Amino acid sequence: MEDPILEAARAIRPYLAELLPADTATELDGTLAALLEHRAAGELRDVLARYPRTREWTSEFLAYGLPPEVAVLRESGTTSPPGHGDPVGVPKYVCPSGDFTFYRHAVGQPVPACPTHHCDLDRA
């Protein structure tokens, strides 16, 4: 079974700009991409623990298996606007090369390309 820290590292990448100053986020994203290429789980764990906000985010991801805000949406059932039927799932998109994961929160939200490989993401 794959180490969950690998999935946490893939999933945090789209959130880095919200969690850290821009220059730190850019640097950390490059580091994560390189470590994911080598599947270096131990080093990824250390890098994600380096900053309080990424440490907390990663801890929550490991507890739920989802980004924290996605876990809250799924638990609260508010993934669709009130009065618009049953809550919908939050689709997951992945890089075919395995180093980037994106969770789409709304139908109109564009799915980005993988920042490492500049390719389209596949729906998981």
Image (tube, rainbow, N blue to C red):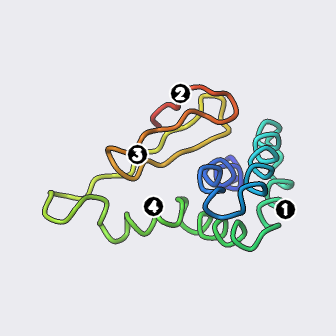
Residue 88 x/y as whole percent: 28, 53
Name the residue tied to disc 4. 70
Name the residue tied to disc 3. 91
From the viewer's perspective, tell me whether residue 81 is left or right of residue 119.
Answer: left
Q: State whether residue 54 is above or below residue 91.
A: below
**What residue is drawn where x is 68% and y is 39%?**
99
> Which is more N-terminal, label 4 or label 3?
4
Amino acid residing under circle 2: Asp
| Residue sitting at the far front | 22
User: Could you tell me how many numbered marks the image carries?
Assistant: 4
Residue 52 placement: quadrant: bottom right
> Which is more N-terminal, label 4 or label 2?
4
As helix, strand or loop, the secondary structure at mark 3 comes to loop
As helix, strand or loop, the secondary structure at mark 2 comes to loop
The numbered mark at residue 95 is none
Residue 58 x/y as whole percent: 66, 65
Amino acid residing under circle 4: Val
C-alpha gap between disc 3 and disc 4? 10 Å
Q: State whether residue 50 is above or below residue 40.
A: below
The numbered mark at residue 120 is 2
> Which is more N-terminal, label 2 or label 1?
1
Labels 3 & 4 near each other (Cβ < 8 A): no
C-alpha gap between disc 1 and disc 3? 29 Å
For the residue carrying disc 4, how many other residues have a C-alpha within 10 Å: few (<14), some (14-19), or many (20+)?
A: many
For the residue carrying disc 3, how many other residues have a C-alpha within 10 Å: few (<14), some (14-19), or many (20+)?
A: some
Q: State whether residue 1 is above or below residue 98.
A: below
